[in-house]
Image (cartoon, grey):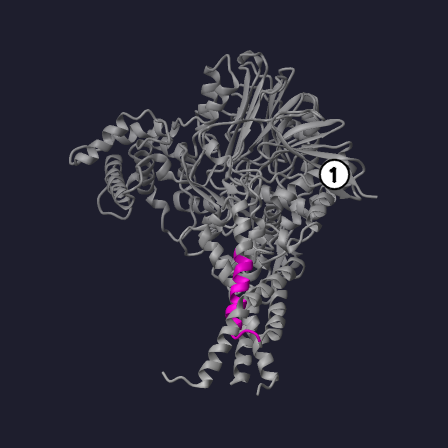
């Protein structure tokens, strides 16, 4: 592959973007988590979209940031409740679905469900910002 | 490109919102169910959580204290009865709200509002048979009594105090799974619940089947197979030979006013199944080790989670009582206080009759009665159906009752209309009986209490600390003409109407009989000398086994009674297996079949959990009866086959009856042919069963597979493979789906001698350690000591306290 100035510029951008990935995730997780404590669950959609909008210049993987944030929030909280419950409820609920009887699996699935909507909601805000703000 | 990316992500997010927020087909809304902030995870209560949160209510007049013991039984201490029943409502809802809600929706015919179209027929049936109608009448009647009105109102306020304290996150998990919300409680709902019980427990009637059977077999043969009074082995509740006072009027015969045609092709309504039943008995001090009476009760009902029963102690000035309650209804149903104990079994008297209605034309505006056209009344019932348009059903009411059965169930035949006459339709105040029993102190109080009880008829067994024991079959029972109510009756004239009820003081009863015990197990209440005609579907095995054991037993301790409640002796096997073996042609049996025969010959008739012989016997007996009563299969009409007792009796009396022949084969079958054929097909089927279950030990408990089923029918929340013996017709009446739903052994006057257990747990929360924690002990025949605490008593088994205070 040929080295061009554009390539280096891109690499630099990526490094910058990566550097901001974790702060963006934490921002998303903190605010969406807080919102869900006091507001209906779907408040997370607005929180993610708004944060996605305002952080779009810093980081280029909005879906993964949103996914990771909400995966962590839902999975960690579920894991916390599940371990205090000694898996009594989760070991039964998991049997409702055609899945192996594993509480940990149910925690992961919960995380994935949170992640999917968090990811897309962040993407909405991010792509809206890209749409309305002209970059030179 | 950027625009496309934005639009696509927006569309996906919106679609996700829809499936996360709304129920799509059978799936729960994803976020409402999975979100750890509001979904089922919120119901994953901490494993060591005990209720201790304080509550306040403007309804409370004084402080109340709810003390929980180590089995999560609430012991409620209040300063007055209003606070007491308020708190009973509050704590019951706290642990069992979803169950209360669902059961009243079933009775009200409102299940399709939640579940959708697939349960619409069930809802229509509930309305057609008049459960709502009966509940409305009984509510008006119950409100006439200031005491019961107040109790209902207090209880309702308590349930609602709990409901209004909830948020979507704290709703019971099932609400999230089925995606609906609890609605406020009302006294009408408590009445619906009592009618739900009445429907489950009354109407030991097979009018449609009997009418068809008479057409098929002739009246004489029918009477031989389904006799009102088999000549012997009745062992009734009131001991044979007891003298009854003479009846007031003459006993008439209903004559030949039976229906002339085939009654029906099917029976679309819910009915108690043959294996619903119950045992209760009491012995006085002459038979016990410590000279104090012992009272025992085990109602056999569907084995469900959350359990039909919820244990509680109620304490306030003037009342201190412990026992099993039905969530949604105030007071205690089966229990004890400091002075008395009582228990219930079902009275199997038929109180549900069907009348054939002749309408003038298709409009069904008028029907024939005593040669005139009478105007009918039409009521339009409305059914909200989830996800579908509202459905309406017009129910036609006649002087007999609602026309529940019509063309809807009979391929659109316009001429077949049947009205239902049922004591559950009448106004009644069963709650007054429960309250008076709860505060009762002696036999006089007990008799005063039970007289208010109308439906479902119950055998109230009673024991008092002063050694009085008694049993009354109580309910509002029809004073029938002979044969009245056995068949679908002609509804066109007054000769078939109910002419009245058996006077309450003539209901079958016995106080302090010489034999030192009283008992009931759904058998005939009396012998044939009782001056009133009655009909029903009766038990013939459990009652004889219980009475035989109680007669033999002396110096009885509580543990002996526990053993008797868990007794697996199979009396119908004792009386039928020798007959089968005698008629079995052993020539031509292969080695494994000979092995089965050897096991059966050596079997001592106990349906114990760990034996294989009960599997061979029960399967053989079922197959034999199928072959024997082939006349009843097919025929394109609704029929019931004779029960085990009547079958054995018939075979002993008519060993070469032509009914034994299989009508579909050219040869003439004899008892020998049927016994041998059914034996061979049993051995083949069980061989196949063993091949299909290679990892399962071939024992009765595994084969029977007793399952305690969650009300939603979800296997995930149910407990199957319960290791227990018995069967229906055995004292331990545990079949695959039904069984002793509350076992109680209590000794009035002997403090601390109170034991009980039920196959469930106090919590209705699937995620609680108290959800199904009694089942294993129940299966082993274990009991827990029941604590009748005093106010402020410190007991080592008390784990937590919940306090209620008045809010200004």
Extreme residue toward the right, this view: B808
> Quadrant of residue B292 in the image?
top right
Q: Give the range drawn in magenta.
A: A58-75
- Tell me, yes or no, whether the highlighted magenta stretch contains residue A70: yes
Residue B401 percent location from the top left of the image:
62, 49
Instruction: Determine if residue A33 is in view.
Output: yes
Q: In the rendered view, tell whether residue B654 sits above or below residue B239.
A: below
Which chain's residue wears label 1? B
Quickly name the residue at label 1: B804
- Secondary structure at badge 1 equals strand
Nearer the observer, B607 or A117: A117
Residue A124 percent location from the top left of the image:
57, 75
Q: In the rendered view, tell whether residue B711 sits above or below residue B148.
A: below
Q: Residue at x 52, y 52 (%)?
A: A79
Residue B164 percent location from the top left of the image:
71, 51
Which quarter shows the C terminus of chain A? bottom right
- Tell me, yes or no, whether the highlighted magenta stretch contains residue B207: no
Q: Residue at x 31, y 40 (%)?
A: B696
């Amino acid at each position: 592959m040929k080295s061009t100035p554009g390539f280096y510029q891109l690499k630099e951008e990526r490094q910058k973007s990566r550097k901001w990935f974790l702060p963006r995730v934490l921002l998303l997780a903190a605010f969406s988590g807080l919102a869900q404590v006091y507001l209906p669950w779907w408040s997370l959609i607005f929180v993610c979209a708004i944060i996605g909008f305002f952080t779009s210049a810093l980081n280029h993987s909005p879906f993964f940031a949103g996914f990771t944030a909400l995966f962590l929030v839902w999975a960690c909280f579920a894991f916390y409740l599940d371990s205090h419950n000694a898996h009594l409820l989760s070991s039964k609920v998991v049997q409702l679905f055609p899945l192996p009887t594993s509480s940990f699996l149910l925690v992961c699935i919960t995380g994935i469900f949170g992640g999917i909507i968090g990811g897309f909601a962040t993407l909405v805000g991010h792509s809206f910002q890209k749409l309305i703000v002209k970059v030179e | 490109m950027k625009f496309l990316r934005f639009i696509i992500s927006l569309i996906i997010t919106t679609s996700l919102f829809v499936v996360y927020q709304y129920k799509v087909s059978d799936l729960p809304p994803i976020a409402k169910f999975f979100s750890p902030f509001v979904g089922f995870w919120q119901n994953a209560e901490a494993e060591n959580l005990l209720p201790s949160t304080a509550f306040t209510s403007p309804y409370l007049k004084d402080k109340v204290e709810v003390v929980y013991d180590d089995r999560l039984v609430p012991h409620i201490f209040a300063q007055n009865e209003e606070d007491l029943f308020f708190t009973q409502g509050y704590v019951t809802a706290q642990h069992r709200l979803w169950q209360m809600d669902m059961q009243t929706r079933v009775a009200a015919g409102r299940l399709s509002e939640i579940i959708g179209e697939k349960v619409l027929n069930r809802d229509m049936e509930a309305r057609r048979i008049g459960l709502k109608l009966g509940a409305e009448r009984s509510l008006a009647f119950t409100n006439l009594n200031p005491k019961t009105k107040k109790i209902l109102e207090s209880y309702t306020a308590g349930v609602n105090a709990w409901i209004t304290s909830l948020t979507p996150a704290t709703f019971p998990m099932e609400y999230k799974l089925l995606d609906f919300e609890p609605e406020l409680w009302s006294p009408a709902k408590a009445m619906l619940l009592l009618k739900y019980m009445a429907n489950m427990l009354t109407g030991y009637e097979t009018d449609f089947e009997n009418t068809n059977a008479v057409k098929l077999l002739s009246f004489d043969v029918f009477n031989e197979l389904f006799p009102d009074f088999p000549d012997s082995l009745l062992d009734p509740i009131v001991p044979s030979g007891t003298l009854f006072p003479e009846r007031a009027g003459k006993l008439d015969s209903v004559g030949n006013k039976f229906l002339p045609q085939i009654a029906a092709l099917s029976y679309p309504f819910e009915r108690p199944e043959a294996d619903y039943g119950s045992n209760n008995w009491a012995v006085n001090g002459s038979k016990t080790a410590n000279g104090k009476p012992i009272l025992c009760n085990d109602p056999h009902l569907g084995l469900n989670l959350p359990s039909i029963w919820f244990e509680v102690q109620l304490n306030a000035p003037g009342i201190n009582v412990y026992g099993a309650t039905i969530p949604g209804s105030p007071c205690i149903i089966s229990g004890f206080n400091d002075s008395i104990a009582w228990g219930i079994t079902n009275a199997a008297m038929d109180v549900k009759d069907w009348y054939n209605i002749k309408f003038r034309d298709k409009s069904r505006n008028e029907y024939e009665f005593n040669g005139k056209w009478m105007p009918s009344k039409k009521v339009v019932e409305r059914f909200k159906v989830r996800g579908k348009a509202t459905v309406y059903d017009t129910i036609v009411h006649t002087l007999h009752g609602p026309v529940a059965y019509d063309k809807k169930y009979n391929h659109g035949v316009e001429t077949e209309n049947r009205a239902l006459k049922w004591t559950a339709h009448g106004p009644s105040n069963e709650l007054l009986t429960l309250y008076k029993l709860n505060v009762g102190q002696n036999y006089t109080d007990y008799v005063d209490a039970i007289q208010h009880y109308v439906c479902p008829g119950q055998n109230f067994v009673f024991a008092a600390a002063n050694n009085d024991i008694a049993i009354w079959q109580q309910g509002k029972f029809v004073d029938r003409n002979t044969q009245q109510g056995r068949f679908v009756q002609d509804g066109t004239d007054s000769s078939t109407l109910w002419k009245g009820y058996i006077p309450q003081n003539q209901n079958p009863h016995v106080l302090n009989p010489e034999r030192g015990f009283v008992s009931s197990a759904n058998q005939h209440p009396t012998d044939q000398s009782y001056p009133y005609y009655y009909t029903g579907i009766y038990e013939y095995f459990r009652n004889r086994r219980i009475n035989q054991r109680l007669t033999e037993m002396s110096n009885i301790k509580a543990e002996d009674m526990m053993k008797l409640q868990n007794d697996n002796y199979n009396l119908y096997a004792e009386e039928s297996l020798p007959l089968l073996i005698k008629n079995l042609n052993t020539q031509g049996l292969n080695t494994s079949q000979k092995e089965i025969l050897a096991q059966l010959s050596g079997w001592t008739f106990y349906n114990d959990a760990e034996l294989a012989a009960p599997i061979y016997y029960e399967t053989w007996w079922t197959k034999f009866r199928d072959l024997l009563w082939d006349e009843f299969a097919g025929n394109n009409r609704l029929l019931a086959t004779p029960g085990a007792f009547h079958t054995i009796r018939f075979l002993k009396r008519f060993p070469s009856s032509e009914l034994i022949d299989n009508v579909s084969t050219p040869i003439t079958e004899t008892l020998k042919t049927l016994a041998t054929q059914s034996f061979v097909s049993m051995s083949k089927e069980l061989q196949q069963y063993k091949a299909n279950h290679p990892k399962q030990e071939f024992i009765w408990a595994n084969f029977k597979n007793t399952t305690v089923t969650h009300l939603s029918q979800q296997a995930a929340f149910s407990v199957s493979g319960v290791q227990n013996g018995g069967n229906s017709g055995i004292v331990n009446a545990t079949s695959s789906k039904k069984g002793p739903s509350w076992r109680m052994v209590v000794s009035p006057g002997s403090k601390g001698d109170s034991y009980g257990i039920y196959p469930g747990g106090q919590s209705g929360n699937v995620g609680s350690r108290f959800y199904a924690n009694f089942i294993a002990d129940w299966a082993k025949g274990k009991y827990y000591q029941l604590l009748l605490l005093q106010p402020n008593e410190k007991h080592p088994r008390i784990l937590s306290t919940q306090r209620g205070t008045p809010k200004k």
